[in-house]
Amino acid sequence: MKNFNWLLDGSIVGLYLLVTMFAGLYVRKYVGKVEHFLVAGREMDVYLGIASLAATEFGIVTCMYTAQNGFKYGFSGATPGILMALAMLFVGLTGFVIKPLRDSGVMTIPELIEKRFGSRIRMAAGIVIVLGGLLNMGVFLRIGGQFLVTVAGLNVGYLEIMMTLLLIGVAVYTIFGGMLSVLITDFLQFVVMSIGLIAVTILILYTVGWDTLVNTVEINHGAGGFNPFVHPEMGWQYVAFNGLLNLAAVLTWQTTIARVLASKDSKTGQQIYTRTSFFFICRFLIPGIWGIAALAVLGNATDSLDAMPQFLAITVPMGLMGILIAAMLAADMSTDSSYMLTWASVIYNDILAPFRKGWSEKRGLLWNRFIVALIGIFLLIYGLWFKLEGDLWTYLGLTGTIYLASISVLLVAACYWKRANSWGAVASIFVSAAIPLGFLILEKTNLDLSKQIGPYYSGIAAYVCSALAMIIGSLLKPKGENTI
Amino acid sequence: MKTFWFVLTILAIIWYIVVTAYVGFKGIADIKQMLKRLEAQKIEDDENNFQ
């Protein structure tokens, strides 16, 4: 047990959990239709959207990989955040893809894809989205638990029990209230999470000091710690991969897009993007500073993923520790609930589409709730046995690329290229899934070869080849044949 | 580059404090409005089902 005090900090955490559960369950009475469950009846306005998007896209896992980036790469580790902010700003200002997507009135991305490429492509798109999304989310639980037990100084043996209970709590309000519960709890979680993040960052800057942070980066990383292009482990390929990854994520990451689809209209969706864009710099930079501070205090012999929570455990005082843990629980719960709901929405709306003709609203709701519960069970099982190789952000980027590359290509083609067709779509989905999956398998079977190729070239190849596959496949198909 | 990261860090902290306060305040109004509209929809749906 370190600085965590059960009476003071435990009470803060307990109060936060009680309020969240109450709020999450309270709004279940407004859920009468599948549309309420999946997109909150499309009644979300700008500020609730900003809070929800920010809370969803910042979980404990985010804090861990961004801090790991800070520890391993210095300030250059925040590069993906800057690239994502630029992508959000560009898409928000221009409405690129998200405007036609919201205007079409669909509930998921594959629903729009069906309008252009047919029902089989919709199902295939749904499968890769769910596959990439669930593999991505699979590591959330263990990483979150790792953070919480380290910071609170709990026995590691409690990790599984603690995270199981947390997941059950999140699943209960998500199953009953769907997107409405997610939005209300996201709002609470955004406020609690932000207070905790700001307070801890100010404490770190005050106790460790800016000059110490800069000197630490200089000593451990040299010029590469400030400029990603000259960092020996990063370089142009890291920047290029993250540029493509973040643009694709902004356009197609289902949890992000869910906020556009739940917004009142496309203008509101664009405003949410524009006004949240700078948050993505904070999302990488603030925990990145925590990671650098951990490097300054603990030294570079510490494990890069464990360093930040170990550092917080000895730095954050009693009282603030309770706020920090409540903040991180808030971050994790908002991410888990939103991710469970989002992938469930794709399974119900797109993969089950051919089987649910004539279903009543009541039956649809029941199935949605059942799928959310199944995803929760998957998370428990996968989260307990999967062993992570390499750094966390790269794993998340690679598993996300399984669908990000093809779905972003499909979406852009569906919205802006008249010649695009189902042959190109199939080729694009296949290539985009095969390259990152092949690399993940290679990491488990031939580590040396996988290290030679590296995740960045593999990631770039997935995006470039997926776009080429769309172009070549579409041009090969004779004109006039609309479906396979 | 050091100045760039210093300015960005300060901007990030200030932006985050301002946005948390502003969104925290305006978000409550959004929630109230959303629940009001959903309540009205629910009443309308119930009436249609009854007819």
Image (cartoon, rainbow, N blue to C red):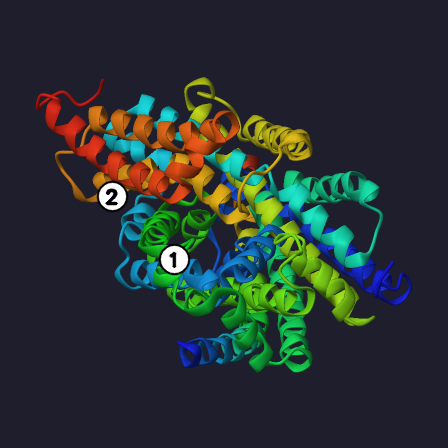
Callout 2: few (<14), some (14-19), or many (20+) C-alpha neighbours within 10 Å?
some
Q: Residue at x 38, y 25 (%)?
A: A123
Q: Residue at x 39, y 48 (%)?
A: A249
Q: Is residue A243 shown left or right of residue B5?
A: left
Q: Is residue A440 above or below residue A271?
A: above
Q: Residue at x 74, y 51 (%)?
A: A21
Q: Is residue A302 shown left or right of residue A455?
A: right
Label 2 marks which chain's residue?
A: A
Element type at marker 1?
helix
Residue A118 at x, y = what percent?
27, 25
- Which of the labelled discs sits on residue A412, or is there none? 2
Q: Using the image as rendered, state which of residue A451 and residue B34 is in the foreground.
A: A451
Residue that numbered label 1 is attached to = A269
Quadrant housing residue A273: bottom left
Q: Which badge, 2 or 1, is on the more N-terminal residue?
A: 1
Tag in front: 2 or 1: 2
Residue A55 at x, y = what percent?
57, 58
